[in-house]
Image (spheres, rainbow, N blue to C red):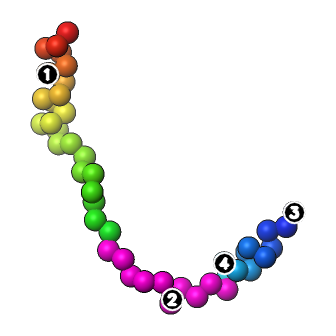
Amino acid sequence: MSDHPVKQEVQNFDKRCLKKTNTAEKNSLPTKEDIEQEKKAAEGGK
């Protein structure tokens, strides 16, 4: 099977028809203090 038609479509794709989007971080990483609090809570529960 050949993927030549797919490659041809990708190469001929017009990027100008795409819309500009803005990305935003939705799930932030926990801070060092949050991690320490979780560790202390886990050790206290044992």
What's under tag 3, amino acid-wise? Met
Q: Residue furthest top?
A: 46
Q: Nearer the viewer, mark 3 or mark 1?
A: 3
**Measuring 53% from the left and 85% from the top, which residue is drawn there?**
15
**Measuring 27% from the left and 51% from the top, which residue is drawn there?**
27
Considering only vertical position in the picture, is 37 above or below 8? above
Upstream in sequence: badge 4 or badge 2: 4
What's under tag 1, amino acid-wise? Lys
Upstream in sequence: badge 2 or badge 1: 2
Residue 23: x %, y % from top left: 32, 69
Label 3, on which residue?
Answer: 1
Upstream in sequence: badge 4 or badge 3: 3
User: What whole-number distance in Å separates the C-alpha atoms at marks 3 and 2?
Assistant: 30 Å
Q: Which mark is residue 40?
A: 1
- Residue numbers of the magenta segment: 12-22
What's under tag 2, amino acid-wise? Cys
Q: Is residue 8 magenta?
A: no
Q: Is residue 17 magenta?
A: yes
Packing grade of label 4 (10 A; few <14, some 14-19, many >=20) is few
Label 2, on which residue?
Answer: 17
User: Is 23 displayed left or right of 1 in the figure?
Assistant: left
What's under tag 4, amino acid-wise? Val
